Image (cartoon, helix red, strand yellow):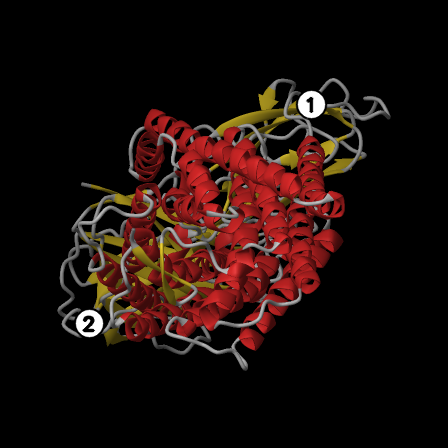
């Protein structure tokens, strides 16, 4: 016989459970509730088994398990334990059943609304779920009023904090699902949502319950300091979680790291206390004890790994918990449910010691191999191993969980039969109703999931519009490269002639999974990073929309329009790939398309200062047709045939003698060098076609300077490419391993000087933002460097109307030089993240690449970055 504590009092294993467990009403409620839990788990296992082919299958499996199974279990057991530990009166059974039903109906509404893209259903489900959990929180608070309390009373605070965390997590999830948080905040909000639900709603009840359940399962008394330490653990975990969620939602990584560190310290303190209660005597339930111990171990490992990831990686690169999901969902949540149910179900469902022992024997069958299978599966899923190992891990963990689920179903059926056998006819009918409701609810959930899954669309070949294929594009086949990344689909708009047979080559270049669904047409399966699928739409005769079906992604901006035009715009030769083009109305270029054969990215490396102190240069103003975006050629006004013009490089005191020749037969041009000081009357005058002048100036001051055409209207001359950079080194400038020059500017497509183009310039609505004259060129043709090398980036903002916030993802600038002055130098303690420049300003930043990888550089005004002002530095060992 072993002493243990139940409801805060010392009892013996052979004693009957407290009288409240003998009542048929609570027993029937637990049967119905666990029938619901079982139904949710079955659905989660089904979704997990087909997640590779089912759109958003991974998301569905996770949320069926968490929003459905785990939430139902936590609501039922947190109320049960709060009543026991507070020595409070049981809440009204009808009120409890209503709240439980609202939780499950809200969960069905949320999952179905997201899956079927029904915003009203999603909103109603979210509101119902939040209302139900708020009511649950109110009940937990009221239970403490007037209750007798006891040694374990403080544990109820864990359940109250958990309910508050779920309310916050549900609100964050609603913001993600509806896109109201904005794509720029998506990564932080998603991480905040994951932490609030996993570490708050699930983690806090687990820790609180273990303070009581762990010694009870072992058959020993709690340590004397349990109550005091439990309060400290809640302060660390609850307070840390609050800081972490706020930091993640605000995109403030130091706050997130500090919060998760506090949470990890709380978990470690709890683990230390529980480890000290272990005794040599056999546990009352060895299966439950070992399972709970494994769950706590995975919880500590998962939180520490989460802390490390947050500390070393940017929030945008994380997006979600990635490899930590199997650790937290299967290693922690599933095993806590298994361990707790292994011990508690016999106590709750049995009417005496003999039946309790029989039910426990059923739940503990083959527990050792089941435990090994489950934990081996978690390890294989979490570790960075080849893909086959992950598949083996999923099968292993699924087999362990499914085996226990089968045993739970057997126990529930056995207990239900016993309940019916022992009761009279009226009691039997009353008992049958909750069980039937539980079964019916499970069936409804299954039917809804199947219907929604079938609504995901055909994943096979394309479809043809019923209107037929006749049109200007009939007989023409066009293939467009489509890229999924950064919560955007590129191109966002494809224009085709009516009747064109359209094929989409879809590639996901993002770190997270995406798919693409065509309205009334085919869909890709979920695509991992760099996965590609081809969708054949057939002849397109009507406008269509396409989107990513993963929950929240469509609302966050992952949509694409397929527009049918009357003419032949965008058509190509049959069987050939063509790039989407921009029109005069401001449609952006297709940055995912390939550059034309023979395209060469502009060299960004800064050439050394020429010898001597006088530098003679000839610049010819001439119109040229150049490639300004993938597959897009544009007539530009240039200095020297390129836009921007050549970069001039010198030192303080050097003299530049620039001969400007106007070879443009259609208009006049001039030039203005910001690096020199002189009266503008003559050197900056407009030259008529065929004229020339010598512009001579001395570089008296260091800096990154703009030069541009001085002829009015300067907005048009600058907007059509007549600009360039002059770099004057500061005295004593140290040598860098790499020195690059990036001139940022706006790109306006269309006929230069046309009414449509000028209107876009005046509205400041460019078609793209670019570095060195070409949108996205350094994304497809990366700059090169080696790990440990120091790189200097000179940046000049040419405008004509927008500046730049230059940033390199994954690095910190230790040197910042802006408009002729150092703002930061390497021997100082501070660092910088952005070089901010207004139009016509310049400067440089320096950084050292810490390790091999691909470092994106962007204009951190994300409108500009996503529309062309981005590139990559490819760093090798």
The answer to whether 855 appears left or right of 850 in the picture is right
The answer to which of 823 and 431 lies nearer the viewer is 431
Q: Nearer the viewer's eye, disc 2 or disc 1?
A: 1
Disc 1 is placed on an element classified as loop
Which mark sits nearer the N-terminus, 2 or 1? 1
The answer to which of 515 and 220 lies nearer the viewer is 220
**Which quadrant does the C terminus fall into?**
top left
The answer to which of 114 and 185 lies nearer the viewer is 114
Gap between marks 2 and 1 measured at Cα: 58 Å
Residue sitting at the far bottom: 146
Q: Mark 1 points at which residue?
A: 462
Does 475 appear above or below 863?
Answer: above
Residue 225 seen in the figure: yes
Q: Where is residue 401 in the image (x, y as percent from the top left)?
A: 44, 35
Image point (17%, 69%), residue name: 826
Which numbered marker is on residue 825? Answer: 2
Q: Write down the quadrant of residue 195 in the picture.
A: bottom left
Image point (30%, 66%), residue name: 266
């Amino acid at each position: 016989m072993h002493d243990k504590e139940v409801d805060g009092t010392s009892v013996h294993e052979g004693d009957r459970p407290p009288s409240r467990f003998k009542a048929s009403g609570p027993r029937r409620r637990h049967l119905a509730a666990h029938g619901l839990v079982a139904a949710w788990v079955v659905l989660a296992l089904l979704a997990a088994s087909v997640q590779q082919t089912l759109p958003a299958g991974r998301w569905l499996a996770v949320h069926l398990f968490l929003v459905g199974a785990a939430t139902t279990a936590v609501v039922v057991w947190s109320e049960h334990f709060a009543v026991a530990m507070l020595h409070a009166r049981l809440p009204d059974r009808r009120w409890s059943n209503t709240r439980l039903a609202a939780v499950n109906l809200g969960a069905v509404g949320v999952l179905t609304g997201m899956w079927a893209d029904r915003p009203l259903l999603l909103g109603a489900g979210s509101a119902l779920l939040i209302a139900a959990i708020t009511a649950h929180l109110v009940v937990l608070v009221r239970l403490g009023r007037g209750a007798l309390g006891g040694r374990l009373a403080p544990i109820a605070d864990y359940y109250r904090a958990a309910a508050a965390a779920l309310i916050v997590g549900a609100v964050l999830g609603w913001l993600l699902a509806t896109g109201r948080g904005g794509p720029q905040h998506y990564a932080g909000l998603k991480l905040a949502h994951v932490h609030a639900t996993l570490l708050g709603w699930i983690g806090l009840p687990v820790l609180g319950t273990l303070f009581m359940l762990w010694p009870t399962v072992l058959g020993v008394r709690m340590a004397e300091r349990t109550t005091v330490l439990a309060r400290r653990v809640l302060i660390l975990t609850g307070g840390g979680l609050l800081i972490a969620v706020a930091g993640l939602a605000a995109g403030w990584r130091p706050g997130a790291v500090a919060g998760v560190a506090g949470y990890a310290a709380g978990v470690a303190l709890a683990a230390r206390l529980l480890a000290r209660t272990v005794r040599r005597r056999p546990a009352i339930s060895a299966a439950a004890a070992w399972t709970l111990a494994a769950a706590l171990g995975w919880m500590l490992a998962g939180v520490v790994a989460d802390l490390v990831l947050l500390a070393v990686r940017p929030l945008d690169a994380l997006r979600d918990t990635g490899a930590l999901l199997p650790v937290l969902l299967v290693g922690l949540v599933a095993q806590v449910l298994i361990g707790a149910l292994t011990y508690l179900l016999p106590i709750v469902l049995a009417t005496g010691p003999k039946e309790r022992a029989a039910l426990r024997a059923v739940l503990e069958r083959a527990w050792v191999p089941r435990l090994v299978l489950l934990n081996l599966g978690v390890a294989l899923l979490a570790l960075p191993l080849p893909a086959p190992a992950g598949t083996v891990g999923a099968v292993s963990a699924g087999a362990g969980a499914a085996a226990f689920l089968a045993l739970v179903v057997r126990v529930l059926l056995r207990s239900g039969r016993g309940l019916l056998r022992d009761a009279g006819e009226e009691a039997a009918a009353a008992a049958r109703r909750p069980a039937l409701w539980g079964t019916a609810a499970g069936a409804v959930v299954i039917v809804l999931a199947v219907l929604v899954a079938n609504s995901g669309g055909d994943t096979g070949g394309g479809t043809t519009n019923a209107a037929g294929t006749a049109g200007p594009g009939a007989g023409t086949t066009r293939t467009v490269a489509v890229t999924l990344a950064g919560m955007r689909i590129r191109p966002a708009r494809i224009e085709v002639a009516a009747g064109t047979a359209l094929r989409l080559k879809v590639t996901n270049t993002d770190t997270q999974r995406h798919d693409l669904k065509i309205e009334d047409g085919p869909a890709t399966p979920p695509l991992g990073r760099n996965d590609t699928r081809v969708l054949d739409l057939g002849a397109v005769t009507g406008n269509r929309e396409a989107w990513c079906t993963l929950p929240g992604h469509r609302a966050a901006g992952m949509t694409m329009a397929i527009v049918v035009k009357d003419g032949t715009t965008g058509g190509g030769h049959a069987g050939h790939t063509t790039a989407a083009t921009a029109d005069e109305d401001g449609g952006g270029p297709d940055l995912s398309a390939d550059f034309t054969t023979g395209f060469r990215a502009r060299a960004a490396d800064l050439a050394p200062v020429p010898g001597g102190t006088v530098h003679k240069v000839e610049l010819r103003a001439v119109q040229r047709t150049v490639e300004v975006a993938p597959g897009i050629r544009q007539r530009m006004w240039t200095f020297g045939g390129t836009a921007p013009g050549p970069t001039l490089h010198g030192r303080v005191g050097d003299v530049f003698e620039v001969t400007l020749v106007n070879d443009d037969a259609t208009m006049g041009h001039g030039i203005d060098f910001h690096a020199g000081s002189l009266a503008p009357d003559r050197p900056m005058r407009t030259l008529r076609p065929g004229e020339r002048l010598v512009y001579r100036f001395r570089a008296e001051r260091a800096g990154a300077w703009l030069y541009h055409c001085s002829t009015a209207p300067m907005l048009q001359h600058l907007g059509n490419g007549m600009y360039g950079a002059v770099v004057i080194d500061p005295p004593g400038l140290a040598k860098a391993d790499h020195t690059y020059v990036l001139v940022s500017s706006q790109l306006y497509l269309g006929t230069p000087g046309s009414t449509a183009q000028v209107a876009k310039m005046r509205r400041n609505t460019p078609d793209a933002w670019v570095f060195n004259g070409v949108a996205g060129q350094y994304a497809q043709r990366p700059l090169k460097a080696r790990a440990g090398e120091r790189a200097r980036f000179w940046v000049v903002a040419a405008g004509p109307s927008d500046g730049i916030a230059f940033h390199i993802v994954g690095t910190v600038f230790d040197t910042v030089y802006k408009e002729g002055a150092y703002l930061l130098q390497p021997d100082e303690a501070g660092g910088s993240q952005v070089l901010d420049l207004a139009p016509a300003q310049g400067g440089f930043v320096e950084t050292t690449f810490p390790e091999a990888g691909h470092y994106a550089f962007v204009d951190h005004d994300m409108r500009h970055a996503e529309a062309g002002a981005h590139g990559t530095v490819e760093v090798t060992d």
